[in-house]
Image (cartoon, rainbow, N blue to C red):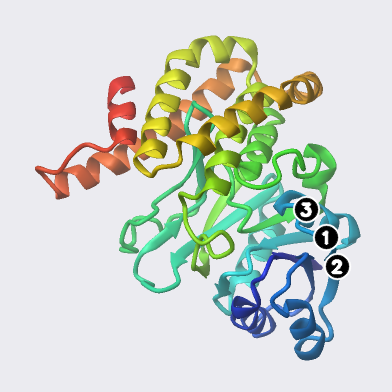
Amino acid sequence: MVTIIIPNLNGKKFLKTCLDSIFKQQFQNFTVTVVDNGSDDGSVKFIKAEYPTVLLIQFACNKGFSAAINSGIRKADSKYICLLNNDIELDPYFLKELVAVLEVEKDVQYCAPKMLDYYQRDKMDGAGDGVFRAGAGYKRGSLDNDNGRYDRQLTVFGACAGAALYRRSFFNEVGLFDEDFFAYLEDVDINMRASLLGLTCLYAPAAKVYHIGSATTGSVFNPFTVRLSTKNLFNVVIKNYPSILILKFLPSLILYHFFWFGLVVSNKQSASYFRGVLTAVSDFPKMWRKRKKTLMLKSVSCQSLLLKISQSEKEVMEMILRRSRKRKGRAVTPVELYLKLFF
């Protein structure tokens, strides 16, 4: 019933925890596919020796997150597709809960679990994904305490592709992950495309995972992540936003990039930022062609999309203000300032 797809790049040290938690699931009607992106740490040998039932797809070099996931999706013939990062440990009821949601909620096309910090299990890592009007995604509830605030099942903007369950039909409608994104914001792009088609994502807190985070790249701010994140911020907007929304959001777009550049400079990654901008410029013709196809298939009004994005951004504002009240006297972060200027 479910195909579980895990992309891997030199993640041998995480695979045992991840795969063992999969095979301990209460729901057992699944197969597992690991797509290896040219690892040289013994990952392939380890999987073949310790997990012979796992389908292994091997690339000779790193083709990126999107290409890895897509290769697994193309091979799958199951009703549901579960995407997992390799630095994830699953609660034993994870699959059972998510499958139950999609079996009951026929109008829901994909769902997101409660993601908790692997090392501090009373801390949230994510409760479904939201989006800023500038095209950047964020994880609802990230760094909050798991104190019951995120225990309600509800509709969210989208799901983090690091842990989510999709109907197979979702990819028939929306298409696969965009391989020109390579990595980072590829799930924001697919969430945006799903929103343009009027598809629904449900946050299902009874399904839980424990996430390490940045396990493959090692940190949030490094040349690789900054370059690709910068490039894909532009690509999300160019590819998915109707012209009227680009014009309406233009002040926000400029301001967000101003703050993003400030964060990048403070982390001594300005060269990577400019490389990302140059790559986005070279990507523009491709993204413009994809934009025409994406917007031609759009089934929701610009007003509906505007409301959905604005509501998602207001939610993170409420979260930040709540934290600000708890920690009076500290400096306002760039993201907080950005949000306060618009709300």
Between marks 2 and 1 in the image, the one whose residue lies nearer the viewer: 2
Tell whether label 3 touches label 2 (CB within 8 Å).
Answer: no
Q: Residue at x 40, y 74 (%)?
A: 119
What amino acid is at disc 2? Answer: Ile
* Label 1: few (<14), some (14–19) or many (≥20) C-alpha neighbours in 10 Å: many
What amino acid is at disc 3? Answer: Lys
Disc 3 secondary structure class: loop
What amino acid is at disc 1? Answer: Gly
Which is nearer the N-term, disc 3 or disc 1?
3
Residues under labels 3 and 1: Cα distance? 13 Å
Where residue 298 sits in the image (x, y, percent)? 74, 23
190 or 167, which is in the foreground?
190
Q: Is residue 187 visible?
A: yes
Disc 2 secondary structure class: strand
- The image quarter in which residue 95 lies: bottom right
Q: Residue at x 56, y 75 (%)?
A: 89
Where residue 312 sits in the image (x, y, percent)? 46, 34
Residue 11 to residue 327: above or below: below
Q: Residue furthest left?
A: 329
Q: Say which residue label 2 marks.
A: 57
Q: Say which residue label 3 marks.
A: 63
Q: Say which residue label 1 marks.
A: 72
